[in-house]
Image: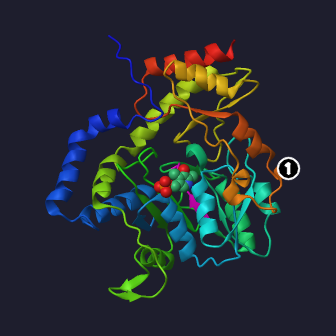
Amino acid sequence: MITVQKIQMVDLKTQYEKIKSEVDNGIQEVINSTAFINGPAVKEFQKDLETYLNVKHVIPCANGTDALQIAMMALGLKPGDEVITANFTYVATAEVIGLLGLTPVLVDVNENTFDINIEAIEKNITPKTKAIVPVHLYGQCCNMEAIMAIAKKHNLFVIEDVAQALGADYIFADGTKKKAGTIGTVGSTSFFPSKNLGCYGDGGAIYTNDDNLAAKLRMIAHHGQSKQYIHDVLGVNSRLDTIQAAILKVKLKRLDSYAKARNNAADFYDKAFANHAKIKTPVRAKYSNHVFHQYTLTLKEIDRNNLREFLANKNIPSMIYYPIPLHKQNAYKSERFNDKDFPITEKLCAHVISLPMHTELNHETLKYITDNVLEFCNK
Ligand SMILES: *Cc1c(COP(=O)(O)O)cnc(C)c1O
């Protein structure tokens, strides 16, 4: 008998059931020890993640938004400094720039790979530019070699937003690989439950190979404290819960097999939609492998709302990441931004659709999803 899965964008329940005893034991151990804050599991997970990423320092923190903010604080960015990032991203990236009084300079992205456009970065560099924040969107790295070359030329920091791409490899022109987030000055990530390495609440981390920067990041995440009750700089309170760290330890061991399961689902989707006149499947960049945080199609001549409604009626959820460019959000509107500077972002916001993507999709479910998408698009 085929068990029909309840189709979800992300199925955390089935995933949990497979690792239940290990996760439950980890949580119970924390409760037994009552070491809820900075218990041993936090340090253990930090070490495990440093080894996995092959990076010198991982600084755990409370969430991915904090990770970005702490990174920008530690780099000493000051009000008025300009920070270049993609217009086509989750709001958190631009939000922390604004919160710190920095100036978000939004730029367009690439139509095929959804990542920040290199020419657009170069065009927007001014004497006030201090940093670039490439967002490794949907699970694929930006063109880091080109970005690092620009950063070097103009003496800029690079803060990699790895919230959607933990575990992805950047592939250098010479074939060598490094983990996303370990190439720039600093990387930041999120352990939000639906992220590729998700905990059961909020969590985040910052990583760097720079010893001095690591010390600053740690200090800022901990109230700017250098020694107990000695506060050298303005900081924040941003910690990873011990219970979350215990869960993350269990899931990190499986991250590569989770990425494989996501890639298998992506391959199934790719095959089903191959060469379809109205459906463009996600393009794999030659400079990255993909961990498919999202599987995102670009539709041509298809009414997206009608497709979503058709799918919803068949109990197939879908999502739009992201429906509105940041420069059109009330919080980020500015006379500095001109619609004509963002043709690709505008196009993607109007035509992308993300299908269910997680570690537990079986072939029956994938076939049911693709059959229904095709039925609508072939009408
Ligand atoms: C999820 C996400 C964040 C924020 O992470 P939180 O843990 O929710 O604060 C930042 N940037 C991107 C691109 C994200 O997808």
Name, please, the residue furthest toward the front: 330
Q: Nearer the viewer, residue 264 or 300?
A: 300
Q: Position of residue 173 (x, y in %)?
A: 66, 52
The N terminus: image quadrant: top left
Residue drawn 28% across the image and 67% down it: 37
Give percent across and percent down for residue 350: 72, 37
Q: Position of residue 282 (x, y in %)?
A: 64, 34
Placement of 342 over or under 258, stated as above or below: below
Residue 359 in sight: yes
Q: Say above or below: 331 vs 152.
A: above
Q: Secondary structure at mark 1?
A: helix
- Mark 1 is on which residue type? Lys
Which residue shows up at 48% across the image and 30% down it?
A: 264
**Residue at image point 22% right, 51% down:** 26
Q: Position of residue 148 (x, y in %)?
A: 67, 63
Q: Is mark 1 within 8 Å of ligand 1?
A: no
Q: Is residue 23 left or right of residue 212?
A: left
Question: Where are the magenta residues, as a range?
Answer: 159-165
Horizontal side of 93 relative to 330 (left or right) equals left
